[in-house]
Image: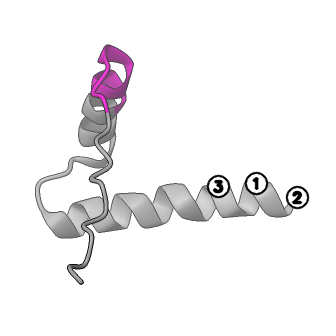
Amino acid sequence: MAKQKKPIHRVQMTEGKRNIIHQLLEEYDIQTAEDIQDALKDLLGGTIDLLRN
């Protein structure tokens, strides 16, 4: 029996999402994959703190 492939989730790139990405690139001066990881840690850390309060 052949294993079924999971459907690929594709996110629609809207103008709003594009603007958010551009703002993040500017705010965090993202140049590398490590820069992206650092930005996500910063953003998610703040989000988790907000949820705890």
Q: Mark 1 packing: few (<14 Cα in 10 Å), some, or many (20+)?
A: few
Q: Which image quadrant: the N terminus?
A: bottom left
Q: Assess whether mark 3 and mark 1 are in contact (beta carbons under 8 angstroms).
A: yes
Horizontal side, residue 51 vs residue 15: left or right: right
Q: Assess whether mark 2 and mark 1 are in contact (beta carbons under 8 angstroms).
A: yes
Earlier in the chain: of badge 2 and badge 3, it is 3
> At 50% from the left edge and 55% from the top edge, which residue is drawn?
43
The residue lying toward the viewer, choosing from 29 and 4, is 4
Q: Quadrant of residue 35?
A: bottom left
- Residue 13, percent across and down? 27, 27
Q: Assign a secondary structure to mark 2.
A: loop
- Residue 49, percent across and down? 73, 62
Look at mark 3 in the image and give the residue it sits on. Answer: 47
The magenta segment: 12-20
Task: Note whether 35 is above or below 29 in the view shown.
Answer: below
> At 30% from the left edge and 48% from the top edge, which residue is drawn?
28
Q: Which mark is residue 53?
A: 2
Q: Assign a secondary structure to mark 3.
A: helix
Q: Mark 2 packing: few (<14 Cα in 10 Å), some, or many (20+)?
A: few
C-alpha gap between disc 1 and disc 2: 6 Å
C-alpha gap between disc 1 and disc 3: 5 Å
Q: Main secondary structure of the magenta part?
A: helix
Q: Amino acid at mark 3?
A: Thr
- Residue most toward the front? 1
Q: Amino acid at mark 2?
A: Asn
> At 16% from the left edge and 65% from the top edge, which residue is drawn?
33
- Residue most toward the bottom? 1
Q: Which image quadrant: the C terminus?
A: bottom right
Q: Which mark is residue 50?
A: 1
C-alpha gap between disc 2 and disc 3: 10 Å
Q: Is residue 18 magenta?
A: yes
